[in-house]
Amino acid sequence: MTISRRTLNALLAGAPLAAALPAAFAQSRKDTVVLGMVLEPPGLDPTSAPAAAIGEIVHYNVLEGLTKIEMDGKVTPLLAESWTMAPDGKTYTFKLKKGIKFSDGAAFDASTVKFSFDRAKAPDSTNKARKAVFDNISSVATPDAHTVILVLNKADALLPFRMGENTAVILHPNSVASAATKPVGTGPYLVDTWNKGTSVTLVKWDGYRHADKVKIKKVVFRFINDAAAQVAALLAGDIDGMPRFAALQSLKQFQADKRFTVEVGNTAGKGILSINNKKAPFNDVRVRRAIAHAIDRQAFIDGAQEGLGKPIGSHFAPTDAGYVDLTKMYPHDVEKAKALLREAGVTTPLNVTLTLPPPPYARKGGEIIAAQLAKVGINAKIENVEWAQWLSGPFKGNFDLTIINHVEPLDYATAYANPDYYFGYDSAKFRDMVAKLAETSDPKTKAKLWTDIQRQLAEDSVNGYIWNPAQVAVFRKGLSGLWNSSPIFANDMAAVSWSGRG
């Protein structure tokens, strides 16, 4: 094969050899889509591991839940055909669709739902929604094969939404043991191969209940965390798109290129400087408040996100119900930060470690945050780690500071009502507010509690709240159906198709 100058330039830009295939190769694909992802997941079972990258591959494609969260955030039926809620909000009855099978031929029915939920709330469960969702389920009744009754300890108006998250997908007891590497589900695709460190390939399941509507027969998710390599792979035609494009400094290049479509949408993400609340001196709220005043949110957004994002002042996104803008509680104020450190008895310079996972927002943003902290007397030594190291280190509570985008919607209970969560926030007052919110159905009371919850997190400066990221999708002209917003991290490939290719 003769390598063209454009291909050579792509190679020099950092793309691997596989990324240097001519663009004509991409144009020849009729029923295949190759998408780039920033992170490789640690496994493929979203009910036992926390990484959002798992859902990007398997959720709605391989594994399904009772409900579906659409791109606009609406909740619609999926494996359930309907549901009703008792007046007290503590009992939900789900009517299941009939005739659905798992891809290995096993039947989907009420017993598989009960198995999945009992497993999620078991003492040894590693489901990240266990405490926030499944521990609240006091019983799972199955009066017949197509009816599931969930009785809750406390009312939860958000339960139908939670049933659409990837933590609530339904697995069969016969195949659950292999779910981490080869999950078997009821969705339109099968896991074909997983080349560790490189890609995961899905193939269309012809036995899917709506197989005639699925246009794409093969989906390849390639892992490309280097920003330059993402750009090169797109330009060379090795991938057809990046639903969550990270090389934002190259965005204008693609906006000007008629071969590509660029869409900017919303996410439920909360980008934060996570602080270890259990570790001195961060266990002093004055130190955490000093960090909040040290952060220049807009400078971070401009420098690390090319201006794409919105400043936030608590662990809520502007798209969340009851969102309150609290950014003015901690304006960027170097002198105020220094004064708070002195008040807390901190001797400066304070030497800490800032652990950064692979995404460009963390690596590039970490340099910006370190420079801002240095101005108030906090010397943050940067430690770059791979995703697996981040999960086994900071996510287990072994860190000082780290930067991470919490992509799960409305995860305030999961993250802050659990003292064992990685940043170790322990507030009985906060847990009480969360419990009251779950129990009430009065709109005025809900609105007040939404505000109180956000304000409590901000007053306690649990973390440094920085930005709500925009979703930036870059993909080839002719590819349609990709989500342009992310209420959850998913790629609904059954809705994707090529136009103008025959």
Image: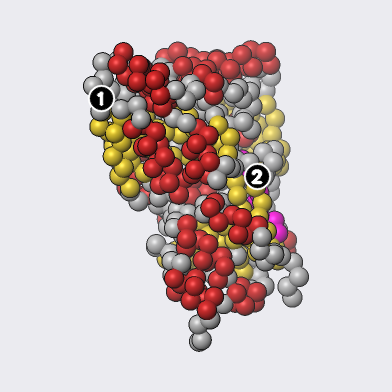
Q: In the rendered image, is residue 68 in sight?
A: no
What x and y, as percent, mark residue 76?
A: 70, 41
The verdict on residue 475 being magenta is: no
In the rendering, which numbered label is found on residue 348?
Answer: 1
Whether 332 is drawn above or below 30: the answer is above
Whether 356 is drawn above or below 257: the answer is above
Q: Is the magenta stretch mostly helix, strand or loop?
A: loop
Q: What element carries label 1?
A: loop
Magenta part of the chain: 480-488
* Residue type (three-letter) at the residue carrying disc 1: Thr
How does the figure colour the protein chain or chains? secondary structure
In the rendering, which numbered label is found on residue 265?
Answer: 2
Tell which of 57 and 12 is nearer to you. Answer: 12
Rendered residue at 32%/19% (across/down): 341
The verdict on residue 487 being magenta is: yes
* Residue type (three-letter) at the residue carrying disc 2: Gly
